Amino acid sequence: MVEPLQSAYRADHSTETALLKVANDLLTACDSGSVSLLALLDLSAAFDTIDHDILLARLNTTFGITGTALGWFCSYLTGRTQAVVIQNRHSEDTILKYGVPQGSVLGPVLFTMYIQPLGKVIKHHNVLYHMFADDTQLQKSAHTKQFTELVQSIESCSDHIKQWMTVNKLKMNDDKTEIMPVGKQSNLKLLSETSSLTLSDTTVTFSSKVKNLGVHLDSSLSMDAHINSLCRTAFLEMRRISQIRHLLSLDATKTLVSAFILSRLDYCNSLLAGLPDAKLDRLQRIMNNAARLVLQLAPSRPPRRQARPPTAHHEQCSTSCAAQAQARPCHPSIQGYLLMTLHWLPIKARITFKIATLCYRSLHDDSAPSYLSSLLKPHVPTRNLRSADAGHLVVPRIKLNAFGKRAFIYTAPSIWNSLPMSVRLSTSLLSFKSSLKTHLFRQYFDA
């Protein structure tokens, strides 16, 4: 009933899974030497402009809902009125012929069913797409010599979408539509003569950076803009929490840090897989300082020599949790002590945990989105191999480490194949997560 590439309002689907699919397609295109256009389309008041008559007809003809069930939906949609009250003056009630309640249980479901035919419109132009509620993303790739045809294809597809929306009483917000070329810098420089495209009567200038479902992306998919934004926000939140730290218990501080800092570091962190350590180290320093904030230790600074194990400095912390930070004098890193004390996995391990969990869900309980699980191919050996290789996934060949090595189609099987067989063969998702976390703690902390 629901468009397969619609990730909103569905169990086990999220902005992260949607962005993983979009990023995978863009990265694999870059790896092959192509350039891509990513178009982010925006709708104006999408939930408020749904035509009830069109929706009921679609429920009947497209989804086969008839009789009493269709009558129930008709009763749910019709008969609603709306009025405006300003300074005790009440307007006349107006019967609502458009819109579904966005905050209701049925509203989002009815909206996704209403725009379900849009996928067929886009497929007609051989353009890749993904939807998240009323956000629609288009993407198409081609060789640099075919960039003009690529632009024309996106223009044609966008015009067709706009025509479909007009017929269906929806309105595209041209002012908020963004177009970004994606590819290697050397290829993008060849496209400097083309800097915009035309959507109906509106000229949209290419952007070098866009914010897509809460993640900052740039034309080379370097993730620099996203990491910069994370660092700014996280340090601001740490400063705010530090100002009231003396009023908080350890548990309360840990809760605040988890809610305002770690949650941001974890949001869509699977997109950071394969990035150079220098970039991930910036996020790791944030986590290290967050741990110090929880345990009431001085913020860390870039060391001039190898950090020593925690000693008398930790005696300033009166909590039992801080006392644990002194308990393992053999560990080579004070930051490692703090993370182990708080039972926090480091940044790279958190990325591994996220992607490995998606692999397990794809292979064992089939709960991962189909658009991701279809990218994972079981490895079928041509001859009998040792049992440790059982359950491996195919790792595709890549050309460029900066792009192909970061695509989900490469990172997911690489991470999965590196796990011990005892972890991969866990009998449930809960036991898999437990075993995986134990494995990662041993791997990163040699515990």
Image (cartoon, rainbow, N blue to C red):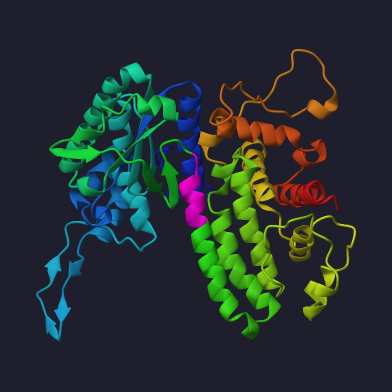
Regarding residue 14, the answer to whether it shows in the image is no
Give the residue at the far top of this rendering: 382
Q: Which stretch appears magenta? A: 222-230
Residue at left 53%, top 30%?
Answer: 403
Residue nearer the viewer, 66 or 38 = 38
Query: Can you give x and y, in whole percent of width and height, for residue 297 in the image?
Result: 71, 72
Query: Per the image, is 228 magenta?
Result: yes
Residue nearer the viewer, 151 or 314 = 314
Residue at left 62%, top 34%?
Answer: 411
Q: Is residue 431 left or right of residue 186?
A: right
Residue nearer the viewer, 68 or 92 = 92
Q: Is residue 13 left or right of residue 36?
A: right
Q: Is residue 423 above or below residue 111?
A: above
Query: Per the image, is 216 magenta?
Result: no
Q: Is residue 53 left or right of residue 216?
A: left
Give the residue at the far front of this rendering: 304
Q: Is residue 273 left or right of residue 392?
A: left
Give the residue at the far left of this rendering: 92
Write down the quadrant of residue 107 in the picture.
bottom left
Residue at left 58%, top 54%?
Answer: 266
Query: Can you give x and y, in whole percent of width and height, for residue 256 in the image?
Result: 59, 72
Write down the quadrant of residue 167 in the picture.
top left
Q: Quadrant of the N terminus?
A: top left
Q: Is residue 105 above or below residue 128?
A: below
Regarding residue 128, the answer to whether it shows in the image is yes
How many labels were placed on the picture?
A: 0
Residue nearer the viewer, 219 or 158 = 219
Query: Can you give x and y, in whole percent of width and height, for residue 326 in the image?
Result: 85, 69
Mainly helix, strand or loop, the magenta region? Answer: helix
Query: Can you give x and y, in whole percent of width and height, for residue 179 in the image?
Result: 31, 38
